[in-house]
Amino acid sequence: MDSIRKNKLAITLFMLPAVVLFTGIIIVPIIMSFIYSFQEWNGITDPEFIGLNNYIELFTSKSAGFPKTILNALLLAVLSVFIQLPLSLGLALLISRGIKGERFFMTVFFIPVLMSTVVIGQLWLKIYNPRYGILNVILDTLGFDALAQTAWLGDSKTALLAVFIPNLWQYVGYHMLLLYAGIKSVSPDVIEAARIDGATDMQINTKIIIPLLKPVIKICVIFAVTGSLKAFDLIYVLTNGGPDHASEVPSTLMVNMIFGESRYGFGSAIAVLIIFLCFFFAIVIKKAIKTEDYDEK
């Protein structure tokens, strides 16, 4: 009994620093944001309690444009789920077959994940530059003169898609690595038995590997959707939500409201809704993608 108590004390002492850090860095700021979201505060004068006015203004004020930022974030989420993840899955299935240079390709595709997002943003600013950017140079060389004159980040029709492509390039390797690890965990005996029974590679992928990957796919979908809802740094570097709010997402609007207009209460309301939306969609995806072998019934 004494040894059990000593073990509990040791576990508590070892966990205490992590709990303190988690509480101070995550829990306390969330609580403070929730409190500030019910106040009108400019960061200097005393805050004034205004109830739900900030939340009402978010959805009723045309100048705030919050509903549009939600639509932009959801569009990025849809593109991530239906373009980024299938591409990652295809690459993972291809590389996991034991091709020559398997580790090399894994490293190459994962390098963008390790790079600073600010560096990636600056890189793609040069690629998209309408005068000397490599994208327009290639289009001009191929004879697409009209497209070669496009200001990809400066046109409200193309800005959001232009922001998504660097995001696709940066995180396709991240999801590919998760899926690759899942594929490697599938028993080779199961695959070999399927080959003996005459199954093709396509049948093995669709009937065996992908169904067994559902728990990993579910995690990737959650990461892709919640990542799109809280996307900030890359969009901030590339467009800062412009032009004319065409690429504005909740996080960039929040920063502009807090640091640009000194509306800390209004910005805190946006932060609270971002947290709520991330939790909401994570729960919905968890319920929507059934993994009977892993989920509790």
Image: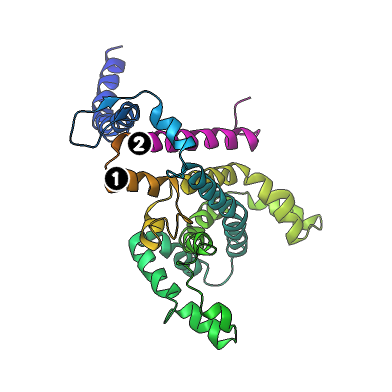
Q: Where residue 164 sits: x, y (%)?
A: 50, 59
Screen quadrant of the C terminus: top right
- Tell me the amino acid under the disc marked 2: Phe
Q: Is residue 49 left or right of residue 59?
A: left
In the picture as drawn, the residue positioned furthest to the top comes out as 1
In three-dimensional space, the C-alpha distance between marks 2 and 1, rounded to whole angstroms, equals 10 Å
Q: Is residue 251 magenta?
A: no
Q: Is residue 292 magenta?
A: yes
**Callout 1 crowding tier (Cα within 10 Å): few <14, some 14–19, many ≥20:** few
Residue 133 in the image, given as x and y percentages of width and height: 43, 78
Q: Nearer the viewer, residue 281 or 144?
A: 144
Which quadrant of the figure has residue 257?
top left
For disc 1, the marked residue is: 261
Q: Secondary structure at mark 2?
A: helix
Q: Residue 266 got which mark? A: 2
Residue shown at the point (23%, 32%) measured from the top left? 17
Q: Is residue 116 visible?
A: no
Quadrant of the drawing holding the N terminus: top left
Q: Secondary structure at mark 1?
A: loop
Residue 220 horizontal side relative to residue 52, left or right:
right
Residue drawn at (23%, 26%), measured in percent from left and top? Answer: 13
Q: Residue at x 18, y 32 (%)?
A: 45
Q: Main secondary structure of the magenta part?
A: helix
